[in-house]
Image (cartoon, helix red, strand yellow):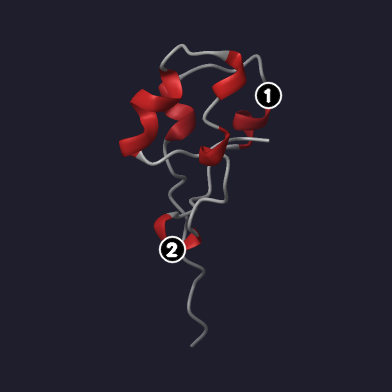
Amino acid sequence: MTVILAPKDYERWLQPGDSSHLPVDLLRPYPAEEMNAKKVSSGVGNVRNNSPGLCQPLKLIEPAQAP
């Protein structure tokens, strides 16, 4: 499962340390109110794809308004 860390915890997570004192307290659910979701290309799901454009949100076309 993916771990989402707050920026304040980056350094602590990346520090090498004793395997008996791992920062497991950081493995907690990330607050939903601090996340957002955007629709991206279906190419994101293919491990062969690797380009910055995959992170760009799709521009959604608004459906035409019925008269």
**Which quadrant of the figure has residue 36?**
bottom left
* Residue identified by numbered label 1: 46
Query: Which circle marks residue 15 in the picture?
Result: none
Which residue sits at x=52%, y=83%?
66
- Which sits in the foreground, 25 or 44? 25
**Which quadrant of the figure has residue 19?**
top right
Which residue sits at x=57%, y=40%?
27
Query: Which circle marks residue 33 in the picture?
Result: 2
- Which sits in the foreground, 30 or 54? 30
Question: Could you tell me how far apart the alpha carbons at marks 1 and 2 are, in whole angstroms?
Answer: 28 Å
Q: Amino acid at mark 2?
A: Glu
Q: Does residue 53 sit above or below 57 in this rendering?
A: above
Q: In the image, residue 41 lies at what x, y percent?
A: 56, 37
Spot the residue most to the bottom.
Answer: 67
Which residue sits at x=50%, y=39%?
4
Q: In the image, residue 5 lies at what x, y percent?
A: 45, 38
Q: Give the mark toward the camera: 1 or 2.
A: 2
